[in-house]
Amino acid sequence: MNFHLIAIKATTIYAKSALNLYKIYLKGTVQRMNKKIEKKKYFYDEIQDQVIVNFVKQDLTERQKERKQFELNWELNMNFYFGNQYCYISGNNEISDIEKKYYWENREVYNHIAPIIEARLSKLCKIKPNFSVLSKSNNQCKTISSTLEKTILQNSLSDNSFKDVMIAATYWSEITGTSFYKLSWENNMGDIVGESENGYIKNGDVKVSICSPFEIFPDSNGAENIEDCDSIIEVRSLPVRFINEKYNTNFIGEDVDLFELGNTSFLSGISGRSNITKITHSKKHNQALMIERYEKPSVKHPNGKLTIVCKDVLLYDGELPYIIGNNGNRTYPFIKQVSTRQIGCFWGSSIIERCIPIQRTYNAIKNKKHEFIERLASGVLSVEDGSVDIDNLENDGLAPGKILIYRNGSTPPKFLEVNEIPSELENEEQRLIEELSSVSSVSEIMSSSNVPSNINSASALSIIISQDNSRLTLTAENIRSSITIIAKYILRLYKQFANIPRLCNVTNFKGESEMIWWNNENIISDNVYLDSSNELDESASTNKANIINLFEKGFFNDETGHTSAHIKNKILSSLGITNFDSEDDIQKLHKLKALKENKNINNITEASEIDNHLIHINEHTKFLLMEESNFTSEAEKEILLKHIKNHKQKLEEEN
């Protein structure tokens, strides 16, 4: 549907009537929901309800046992990332600490895993969730960036702070190997459109949230994709107040076991006392566990099935709520994101899993070196049995200027000869650093911003940086694929639920901003793609150099061989210089005047002497080419053609 025609039809009367209809619709929806969740009217068979509850809980228990080993791996990864690296998975299926063999052992942690993950995150977070939507229209002149679907999508992503959501999900996937996005339609979100006896009425909106891998239980850990699972269980800890308000219940909150970061202090060699962060368990109060079991469509359940259980009470048992699958089918509201895929496994793998053995060895080598240094600095004293006061020597040591009394006739105490630090330790330490770089796809330049001593040319440095980016391409493509599916699901949710007109501020490719009424009928296409191809290879300096190079070669010149003021402003904006583009720019004012004439053709006047005729001719011609098929009458077309001819005559007179 044409944006300009929509804007013309969006009169004040239309707006008021739309809001009134919306209030009536939402009021009815709230009433229907209250009836649906009221136990006396909705649950007809208490015995059958309990059978369903028992089945869901038993199914969850079995899946927890099957997923236990993966969960332990995630906990171990988290411990190593945060610095608790003297731990392991014991035979009792628990994360246990590795005890010291001797009290004097050095147990410092030289954490190289954290900077590796942070370096990868800094690269992966360059991915920008900027989407375009391919139109299904046959009009080849229709510009993609001016479509309503793109504006709706970008507004939804902005409202959900999607960039922050994506970074948090990538954080989870880099540490545990897997993270999940969940999409839902929330009636308590969106703009306030009225009031009822139950409170404010809102028009509803899409919510994008994160699910950690600890919350998701597939029916098979061998299913590679979400679509391959026959059912998925999600377990969430929610405030009991939220559950009572949403489902009209009277649950009492309880304590729920959660992960948290704790500090552990221990004695260690040269540096004395060290503090590390480790994963511990804590209690969250006034919570309740919500169990949601999703079953994909089948012959028995063509629309799938969703069962919601909380505190042994069946809250919902019906079809899947969202029509977000391909070809108008219902499907799971989850999107999986992995760091590295594993063949024949539902869960992705983390780089940390590869680094753990190397990190253990590195800590051991580094601590052995420090023990050698400690022996060199303090020495190892040899004394004859009974020749000195051992207790005094152990407590006070050999202070400078101390008088050491030993038994007459005995051998005087002396320091044992200590060899220098073996070169094998130095060589092994360097080999381990190189191996960490190899298995983590992060070079020394990327992790520590240090250029290797053997690199002395700019071209070699550029190749290394390019290789770093290439190693991360697979993980980056996994992220890009996941967020593209999210964009499609968002449009499909609006297609399903936004059936009452709502207002949207649209800025098209011409730079014009207008308020437009739209509903689900205006969402025609969900063919979404990302605007940029590979952000990892892009940098601000590279982009600026490319723009300047193209400018010097004349790629931005028009048919007269000059660069228009409009294009110059765009170039300056791309270079980060925006002071030259102001609202008072005369070229922009001419363009805005032409755009206004395009929207009000019937009241168009003769070309003015002060008009920039070339700008007016170009804007009117573009309007005819793009919107020609949407004219309601040939009269409007003829009026605009005559106006263009009038501008051409004025231009010839001036020349």
Image: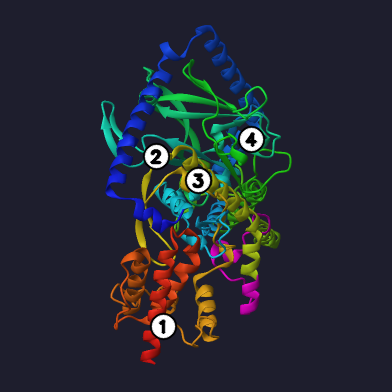
What amino acid type should be assigned to the residue bearing mark 1?
Answer: Lys
Mark 4, mark 1: which one is toward the viewer?
1
Alpha-carbon neighbours of circle 3 within 10 Å: few (<14), some, or many (≥20)? many
Judge whether residue 418 can be spotted in this image. no
Q: Position of residue 377 (x, y in %)?
A: 54, 58
Residue 648 bears which disc, if any? Answer: 1
Question: What is the magenta range?
Answer: 438-463
Q: Position of residue 345 (x, y in %)?
A: 70, 38
Above or below: residue 174 compared with residue 583: above
Q: Secondary structure at mark 3?
A: helix
Mark 3 vs mark 4, CA separation in Å: 34 Å
Residue carrying label 4: 70
Mark 2, mark 3: which one is toward the viewer?
2
Mark 2 vs mark 3, CA separation in Å: 15 Å
Mark 3 vs mark 1, CA separation in Å: 44 Å
Residue carrying label 2: 500
Mark 3, mark 1: which one is toward the viewer?
1
Mark 4 vs mark 1, CA separation in Å: 73 Å
Q: Earlier in the sequence, mark 3 or mark 4?
A: 4
Asked if the residues shown at circle 2 and circle 3 are in contact, with their CB atoms under 8 angstroms apart, the answer is no
Residue at point 65% right, 55% down?
A: 474
- Front-lying residue, 374 or 315: 315
What amino acid type should be assigned to the residue bearing mark 3?
Answer: Leu
